[in-house]
Amino acid sequence: MWRAGRGTAIAHGGESTGHAALDALLPDGGWPRRALTELLLPAHGVGEIALLLPTLARMTGASSRVVLVAPPFIPYAPAWQAGGVVLEHLEVVQAEPRDALWAFEQCLRSGACAAVLGWPQTGDARALRRLQVAADSGNCCAFALRDRKHAVNASPAALRLEFLPERDAWQVRKCRGGQVPSQPLRLAH
């Protein structure tokens, strides 16, 4: 929360994921605010949007802006609407791969977004650190949806979840401020 006349913003708890079992595992009871979360995926369309949809629906329902930067597919508006997302508060930024990280960072830093989802095809630890800092300064939730081959690389993300298709479950790989559960978590689709 930011108050006029005070120099710093204070985060109070996490942003509920909309999945009680996942909220119970996360140290702030949900997605970390003012931080980068990485979703590591074997392919696009494995349930990553379903995982985020309750949060995005709640945010847009509260008239907060959610931005998708360089999504791999054109979002199908009726599906997002059926998931509860208020489309007038959902923005899509089409960016070439070379510009996607810059656009992602600018949206995070703007202070105008509750959440920003990006699909960076490139990005080393330094680039991810810039996204982390931008999410903090812009006071929003940042979600980087990346290929799971990046799971072996160090990351400044506060939270990393990897989808395991063979188990149809999400494995917490990193959780700043909390324990990393040993077992993957299956969530209802």
Image: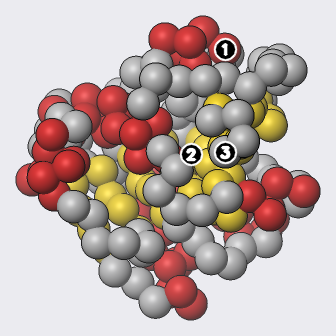
Secondary element at tag 2: helix
Q: 71 or 125, which lies in front?
A: 71
Identity of the residue drawn at 12% across and 52% down: 78
Q: 44 or 108, which lies in front?
A: 44
Q: Quadrant of residue 81?
A: top left
Q: Position of residue 70 (x, y in %)?
A: 42, 74
* Residue named by callout 1: 25
Q: Quadrant of residue 21?
A: top right
Q: Position of residue 16 (x, y in %)?
A: 44, 21
Q: Residue furthest front?
A: 166
Q: Which mark is on residue 165?
A: 3
151 vs 84: above or below: below
Check contact, mark 2 vs mark 3: CB within 8 A: no
Q: 171 or 17, which lies in front?
A: 171
* Residue named by callout 2: 136
Identity of the residue drawn at 45% across and 50% down: 138
- The answer to whether residue 162 is left or right of residue 35 is right
